[in-house]
Amino acid sequence: MTKVENSFQKITTVEQAIEYVDHADTLMIGGFGGVGSPPSLIDGLIESGKSNFTLICNDSGFPHIGAGKLVSQGRIQKLIASHIGSNPVAGTLMTEEKLEVEFSPQGTLAERIRAGGVGLGGVLIDVGIENDIIQFGKEKVEIDGKTFLVEKPLTADVAFVYAKKADPFGNLLYDKSARNTNPLMAMAGRITIAEVDEIVPLGDIDPENVMTSGVFVDYIVPSKGVNWKWVWE
């Protein structure tokens, strides 16, 4: 096996990476129904005892898979997601007013994260323009006779993402549908930590195949293995 030099000082351990997360931080965690989520980082965060987070993710995962583990253990005080249907614990907590939930349609959520990552002040969306829940409290603008909602950008104190491969600089290569929200969230975190299956020497990833540039990645953590492949396969 080729030795990989930690030449950019980005390769670290789960335990060290979790030190960059503070109590009550806003977190982004990649994944879609658990697939593409970073389980080693999630487990490390649970073991740290830190809590009271605002969590931005596509969905609430399953009770024991993906970001849903944090929700199920009561570590989240506010959830921003497109749906929570796969995690009944999230629904119960919301009904009992123990979890604040902000629903955002999936495409809108992705655009808000992208906007945060590239520094936009927001995006104009017509989805939900006639829905009282979605449009409540949001500014409306009219362009060429059409009305849009102003959806504000989303950013995070720390973003956890999962990738198939990384080089020491943090260039990332994702695997099939496990890519999902990870590239967007990698851009939108003040600190971005990537959990990866394999770390390869610099230059082993063809520049044409880089899906997230290492300029967005602050730390790289070797994965201890994923627990969501049954959902995928």
Image (tube, helix red, strand yellow):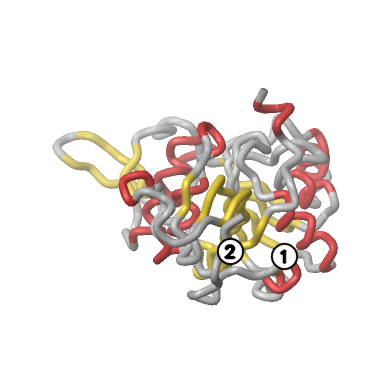
Q: Quadrant of residue 125?
A: top left
Dot 2 falls on a residue whose secondary structure is loop
In which quadrant is the C terminus drawn?
Answer: top right
Residue lying furthest front: 1
> The disc labelled 2 sits on which kind of residue?
Lys
Residue shown at the point (76%, 62%) measured from the top left:
45
The x and y percentages for residue 203 are 39, 57
Residue position marked by numbered label 2 in the rendering: 3
Q: Amino acid at mark 1?
A: Val
Q: Residue at image x 45%, y 43%?
A: 110
186 displayed left or right of 72: left
Q: Quadrant of residue 3?
A: bottom right
Packing grade of label 1 (10 A; few <14, some 14-19, many >=20) is many
Q: How many marks?
A: 2
Q: Is residue 46 left or right of residue 204?
A: right
Q: CA distance from mark 1 to mark 2?
A: 20 Å
Which mark is on residue 14? 1
